Image: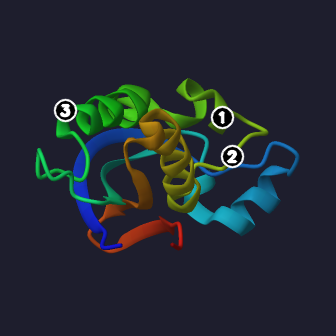
Amino acid sequence: MMTTTLTRRVNFAAAHRYRRPEWDDARNAATFGLCARENYHGHSYVCEVTVRGAIDPLTGFVVDLGLLDRVLQAEVRDRFDHRNINLDVPEFADGGLVPSGENLARFILDRVQRALGDAATVTSVSVAEDDSLRATCTIDP
């Protein structure tokens, strides 16, 4: 069976810092460097979500773009845009996930797949903090 992929890009701006609450300030600083500072820092993120599936012979689509866009709005933009990830997204609060690009990509992949259900298979999510750093979480076929 032939499959095709489709990638949609969304942007969001958010602040975060890296910190493990069970570690003291010295260990956090040694592990996370400037990213552990108390005042947080922000990025203009670029998130790319790739889905795969068979092309519907009636519509010519792998997935209904309206559905995909609604899911990305709810699961990415509404959740992260203009937020402090550590304070506003419970899964990334102290003691939860460290808001690294890697954890963001994996979290977004899981959330988008759950929201899409059987409409399409999410194969990868990339989250870039800037032009020089991108994390990608991939589901192998």
Q: CA distance from mark 3 to mark 1?
A: 27 Å
Residue at 48% across, 46% down:
108
Q: Which residue is mark 3?
A: 66
Q: CA distance from mark 1 to mark 2?
A: 6 Å
Tell me the element at label 1. Answer: helix
Quadrant position of residue 74: top left
Q: Which numbered disc, 2 or 3, marks the residue that appears first in the sequence?
A: 3
Residue at 48% across, 44% down:
113
Quadrant position of residue 5: bottom left
> Which residue type carries mark 1?
Glu
- Between 67 and 8, the residue placed more toward the observer is 67
Q: Quadrant of the N terminus?
A: bottom left
> Which residue type carries mark 2?
Leu
Instruction: Decide: few, some or many residues near mark 2? Use Cα within 10 Å; few <14, some 14-19, many ≥20.
Output: some
- Kindly identify which numbered label has been placed on residue 97: 2
The answer to whether residue 40 is seen in the rendering is no
8 over 33 or under it: above or below: above
Task: Kindly indicate whether the residue at mark 2 contacts the one at mark 1 (C-beta within 8 angstroms).
Answer: yes
Q: CA distance from mark 2 to mark 3?
A: 30 Å
> Which residue type carries mark 3?
Gly
**At which x and y percent is residue 8?**
23, 52
Query: Is residue 62 shown left or right of residue 30?
Result: left
Query: Is residue 28 shown left or right of residue 48?
Result: right
19 over 138 or under it: above or below: above
Q: Which residue is mark 1?
A: 91
